[in-house]
Every structure is written in structure tokens, then in C-alpha cells.
């Protein structure tokens, strides 16, 4: 029997039309199952075959992708909270400037080298602890963003989608302010001034 509806938004690229033979009762139950999930049988079969052929890789990718997004949002909120705290203390700009003066890289890859230097240069312990927390949290957020980019490539590009639809996040910008979406990050990069920032 052949399912007539065609909705392959999740499986772009070359598709083939083939006839398969399925037990009638199983077919009827499968149609009900697909309907409860808001999918066509074509989509259900494609998802099943994908998971079988690739050792359930599709499910793992989706699980990791969703988890990474939740983690990213959590770290975005935390970096914004820490930035706000430092600004309330009146030391955010000064500490940020000092960190970059001491050699902090824009991708935060040398945070572990900069923290000991900061402890020797900055006299106030309370604000220093908050700033170190910000550096570590911002670094973790950046790492998660990179993992999300890889997950996007696995989730979409591995299925034959258009490679031009997904671009890697540009990590060259000095500003690492928390952003909740790719569009926000692009707007942020366009609007930032020449002063380095950590967040």
C-alpha cells in the first residue's frame, strides 16, 4: 500500500517513490500513530529507516541538540546576570579593560592564563570573584555555541540539505555578550563599538 501525502520538510534532497507491502492491520495502526504525532506515514517511515540505518544517530543528534539549546539559554541568562552585577558595582568596564590589557583573547581561549594575572592586579576581592565567574561562564557559553553549530550541521547537513542554509558562528568578534538567537548575535556584532567586552 502507498501513502499518498508528501511532507518531507525534515528530509530535504533527493527523494524516491517506491511501493512497499505492509500488513493491513499494521498499516491502519501506523496511520493512527502517525496522526497522533502530526506526521504523515512517509515521515514516520523515513524517521524509522534513518534511525535503523544510522544506528539511531538521528535520535541522539536531536536529543543532544535540544539539550545544548537549553544549556545555552541558561548560560546566556547567567552571563547577563553577572554583567548586570558588575555594572551595578561600577567595575565592569574597568575590569574588562584590564583583562584585555593583560592579554585576554577575544575567543576567551586563554582565560586560565589571565585569571592569575587578574588576582595580582585587582585589589577588590568581591568584584574579582564575580568577574572570574563571568569569564568562566562566558567561556562555557562559547563552547556550547560551538557544539550547537556542530549539532546543526549533523542535524540538517548530513541529511542532504542545502549547505548554504547553515553558517558557522563567527568567533572573531571582541564582544561575547549573551545572545538568545543567531539574529541577535548578528545585530549585536553590527552594533558594538570598538571597546572589547566580556559577557
Image: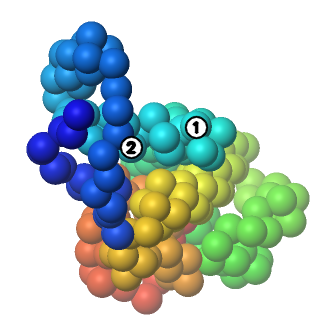
Residue 19: x, y in percent? 30, 46
Mark 1 falls on what kind of element?
A: helix
Q: Residue at x 32, y 63 (%)?
A: 15
Q: Residues within 10 Å of mark 2 (few under 14, many from 20)?
A: some
The answer to whether 101 appears left or right of 32 in the picture is right
Q: Looking at this view, is 35 or 29 the one in front?
A: 29
Task: Check disc 1 and report the residue beneath it.
Answer: 52
Task: Check disc 2 and report the residue beneath it.
Answer: 46
Pointers 2 and 1 in contact (C-beta within 8 Å): no
Q: Is residue 156 above or below residue 65?
A: below
Q: Residue at x 76, y 63 (%)?
A: 111
Residue 45: x, y in percent? 37, 37
Q: Is residue 66 above or below residue 11?
A: above
From this viewpoint, is residue 60 visible? no
In the picture, the disc for residue 81 is none
Quadrant the N terminus occupies: top left
Q: Residue at x 54, y 38 (%)?
A: 51
Mark 2 falls on what kind of element?
A: helix
Residue 29: x, y in percent? 25, 13
Amino acid at each position: 500500500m502507498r501513502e499518498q501525502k508528501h511532507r518531507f520538510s525534515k528530509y530535504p534532497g533527493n527523494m524516491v517513490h517506491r511501493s512497499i507491502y505492509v500488513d493491513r492491520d499494521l498499516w491502519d495502526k501506523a496511520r493512527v500513530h502517525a496522526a497522533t504525532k502530526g506526521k504523515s506515514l512517509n515521515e514516520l517511515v523515513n524517521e524509522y529507516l534513518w534511525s535503523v540505518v544510522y544506528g539511531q544517530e538521528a535520535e541522539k543528534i536531536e536529543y543532544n541538540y535540544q539539550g545544548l539549546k537549553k544549556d545555552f539559554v541558561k548560560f546566556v541568562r547567567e552571563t547577563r546576570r553577572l554583567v548586570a552585577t558588575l555594572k551595578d558595582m561600577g567595575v565592569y568596564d574597568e575590569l574588562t579593560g584590564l583583562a584585555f590589557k593583560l592579554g585576554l583573547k577575544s575567543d576567551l581561549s586563554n582565560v586560565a592564563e589571565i585569571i592569575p594575572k587578574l588576582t595580582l592586579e585587582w585589589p577588590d576581592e568581591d568584584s574579582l570573584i564575580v568577574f572570574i565567574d563571568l569569564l568562566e561562564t562566558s567561556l562555557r557559553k562559547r563552547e556550547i555555541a560551538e557544539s550547537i553549530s556542530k549539532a546543526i550541521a549533523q542535524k540538517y547537513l548530513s541529511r542532504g540539505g542545502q549547505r548554504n542554509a547553515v553558517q558557522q558562528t563567527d568567533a572573531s568578534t571582541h564582544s561575547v555578550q549573551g545572545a538568545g538567537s543567531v539574529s541577535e548575535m548578528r545585530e549585536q556584532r553590527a552594533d558594538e563599538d570598538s571597546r572589547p567586552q566580556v559577557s
